[in-house]
Image (cartoon, coloured by chain):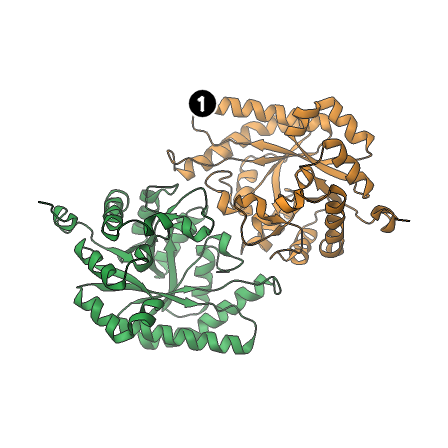
Chain colours: A orange, B green
């Protein structure tokens, strides 16, 4: 007789959250049921899920599965110089904040946007991000949602996020003067940073460490570099070291596993989730 | 009658150096003649060229073409934990220093090496780099050659160079206590860094800005990400801004164009060199 992994392990995945994109090729219902069946407490969902299922229905499904939300992904895209585009982006971000609140997600992850070959002034784009985040902060405060700025790996600086380091994200968060703006530490995006130990400590000290996301840096890079995110342990990242920094910084929240990887998406959801929980127990949990 | 570009422009490419890899698919002799025929003063060569042609013969060919060398590429690969590998690496680097001196190249570019999935302790690898560079510095001083530490783009941190930022390279250079250790500013590797303006100023202030290399950041990334280096103007990098920082830092040396790109390699050498000089004149030279 086969015993399901969640029963074998007891309830051995405290603080683990499964991000929707790790199992993006399954239906939302199967995703929620798979997470719950593995004893996982929380999930990170995307605005695409809201669009597909509807806000109230999605909240109900998450509740019915006995799960809670660790984060909603994503707001952002705040670099446009054009005033009409800026207004549309702010409006879209306010809707995202409201969605996060309605879903009970404490945090909205912010991917701030890139530059264009036509407007390469990256300093100006970064200044617009800071200004727009400050503009959005009161809406986040009112909704009881935090905005987690995501520094992205510098190979995405051009086209996805002009925030490239954790220190830069913290500079922007602090510049808003709002307690509702903080940062995401995503191992894939920040592991290479020589200033990482000090920056994680700073995030903790200033109360702005809002989310810890884990996955590995696999090589060779996939044709779409975003999809080189791997199971913890398959690549080059030293998870115990980074997890100890996050723990020492006082982080007590969920640890979200967010993997974008064609091989993972081709694996049956239950099997992939088993690997996620096993790697989490081996490489992350001991240092929490 | 066609007038060669170098005569059309007079001698319009002061301080431009052509890196060998920009025309890697041509013979070394055609490379040197093409550079000279475009009025270019200097070239950056590789140790593979020394191996192919021989040290003395290569020096003679460079002299005969009326060129000088801006840099020799490359030393480095100093992260191995194993003592035998470390000794072999130091010995190889001492040979590279001697080759640079014999060629009249003022600077040896250092690509310091990566980590492995078996040994992910990046802090330890970085400490070994600093120690090994300090060990090599006296050899460089004795030979009258500088060691230029190259911070590489963080997408190469795992497998090529654990030095990921200009500030980190400067920290290591300063830690050696030697005036013969400095840094390369290569636009492809550092353009994304939010701390770049201050770091370039620091490199100038401390007398450690040894080399300025230019090429663009093209997207989408090539299957081999190193080969996404493009002609200046084809991608996302703001060359006037970065060149102004380098100029303000007091840099008066050569500007080396180092492009790794399959399309450039498929272009006739004379045509590719014409594009390089034209883009240099448009996007770099005005801010020197």
A62 left or right of A132 in image:
right
Q: Position of residue B130 (x, y in %)?
A: 49, 68
Identify the residue at image location x=53%, y=43%.
A224
Closest to the observer: A262 or A247?
A262
B144 vs B264, nearest the viewer: B264
Query: In the visual, does A230 lie left or right of B256?
Result: right
For the point 23% across and 55% down, which residue is it? B15
Choose top left, top right, bottom left or bottom right for residue B73: bottom left
Q: Is residue A168 above or below residue A105?
A: below
Chain hosting mark 1: A
Residue B150 at what x, y percent from top left?
Answer: 41, 60
Residue B189 picture location, percent across and down: 42, 52
Quarter of the view holding residue B167: bottom left
Along the horizontal axis of the image, is A181 left or right of B258? right
Q: Position of residue B188 (x, y in %)?
A: 40, 50
User: Label 1, on which residue?
Assistant: A83
């Amino acid at each position: 007789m086969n015993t399901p992994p969640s029963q074998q392990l007891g309830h051995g995945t405290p603080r683990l959250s499964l991000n929707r994109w790790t199992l993006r090729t399954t239906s939302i219902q199967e995703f929620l049921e798979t997470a719950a069946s593995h004893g996982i407490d929380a999930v990170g969902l995307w605005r695409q899920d809201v669009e597909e299922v509807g806000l109230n229905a999605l909240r109900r499904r998450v509740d019915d599965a006995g799960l809670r939300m660790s984060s909603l992904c994503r707001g952002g895209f705040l670099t446009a110089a054009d005033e009409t585009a800026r207004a549309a982006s702010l409006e879209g971000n306010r809707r995202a904040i409201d969605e996060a609140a309605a879903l009970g997600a404490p945090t909205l992850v912010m991917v701030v946007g890139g530059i264009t070959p036509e407007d390469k002034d990256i300093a100006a784009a970064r200044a617009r991000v800071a200004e727009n985040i400050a503009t959005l902060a009161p809406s986040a405060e009112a909704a009881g949602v935090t905005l987690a700025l995501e520094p992205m790996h510098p190979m995405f600086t051009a086209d996805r996020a002009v925030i490239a380091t954790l220190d830069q994200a913290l500079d922007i968060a602090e510049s808003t003067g709002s307690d509702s703006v903080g940062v995401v530490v995503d191992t894939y995006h920040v592991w290479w940073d020589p200033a990482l130990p000090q920056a994680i400590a700073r995030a903790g000290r200033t109360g702005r460490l809002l989310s810890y996301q884990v996955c590995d840096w696999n090589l060779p890079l996939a044709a779409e570099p975003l999809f080189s995110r791997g199971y913890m342990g398959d690549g080059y990242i030293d998870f115990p070291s980074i997890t100890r920094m996050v723990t020492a910084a006082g982080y007590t929240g969920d640890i979200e596993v967010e993997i974008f990887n064609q091989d993972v998406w081709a694996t049956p959801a239950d099997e992939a989730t088993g690997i996620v929980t096993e790697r989490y127990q081996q490489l992350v949990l001991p240092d929490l």
